[in-house]
Amino acid sequence: MENPIEWLYLNNPTDTVRYILGEKTKNMVACIGINPSTAKPNELDNTLKSVKRISKFNGFDGWIMYNVYPQRATNPNDLDDTIDHDLRLTNIGVLMKSIKHLEIDTIWIAYGDLIESREYLAFCMSSLYTSLGNLNIKWKVIGELTKKGHPRHPLYKATESKFVDFDMEKYVSDKLKPKTKEFEKIYINGIEFK
C-alpha cells in the first residue's frame, strides 16, 4: 500500500496566486515554470503530471513546483501587463525559505519560450537566480534548449527525459540580463518611467 501524499501548497486567500504545489518526500527536486495555472493538490494539470513523471524517472520521489511569477493564468499572455513587485518579492521569499527548509539542492528550469510572454518575466527569473546565489544548487534542464535558447517546457516531453546539467549563470548573464536591462529602464523600484 502506498503512503499517503503529503502535499505542499501555498496560495493566496482568493486563489489568484499560487506560490507552491508539490509532494513532500526526503528526495525532492524543485521545478520552476513560468506561472501557475489551475492545478491544486489531487487536481494536477497535464504540465504537473509531466513534472511528476519526469522527476520520478530522474530518481526523485518528490517534487515541488515554483514559478517565475506566481499569478494564476491558464495562458501566460493573460498575465497582468505590469509587474506587481509585492508578488515578485513574496515569491522569492517563499522560494528561498522552502528550498532551505526542504533541503533541496536540485532545481529544474522548465518554462520554454513562455519567459518572453511579458517583459518583466526575465527580470523576475534573474532576481530569483540572484537570490539563490549563496546556495549550492545543481541547475538542470531536459533535452536541448529551444530555438530561442530557453529551457524546454515539460508538457508533451517523454517520461524518459533525462535531466542534464545547465549553466544557469551563463544563461542569466547572456540571455536574461540583456532583457532585464531594458525592463529596468522602465521600472525603477516599482515606479514606472515613460
Image (cartoon, rainbow, N blue to C red):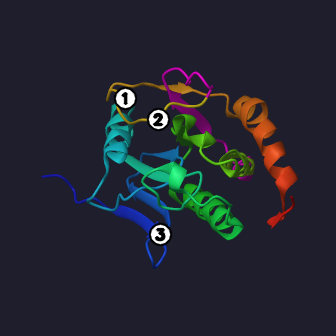
The structure residue drawn at horizontal position 46% and vertical position 68%, both measured from the top left corner, is 10
Do labels 3 and 2 touch, CB within 8 Å? no
Mark 1 or 3, nearer chain start: 3
Amino acid identity at mark 3: Thr
Q: Is residue 17 above or below residue 179?
A: below
The structure residue drawn at horizontal position 68% and vertical position 61%, both measured from the top left corner, is 83
Q: Nearer the viewer, residue 173 or 135?
A: 173
Magenta residues span: 131-149
Alpha carbons under labels 3 and 2: distance apart: 22 Å
Residue linked to disc 1:
157
Q: Is residue 177 left or right of residue 140?
A: right
Residue linked to disc 3:
16
Secondary structure category for the residue under label 3:
loop
Alpha carbons under labels 1 and 3: distance apart: 28 Å
The structure residue drawn at horizontal position 42% and vertical position 46%, both measured from the top left corner, is 27
| Mark 3 Cα shell of 10 Å, populated few (<14), some (14-19), many (≥20) | some
Q: Is residue 157 above or below residue 20?
A: above
Q: Look at the image and tell me whether residue 123 can be seen.
A: yes
Q: Residue furthest bottom?
A: 13
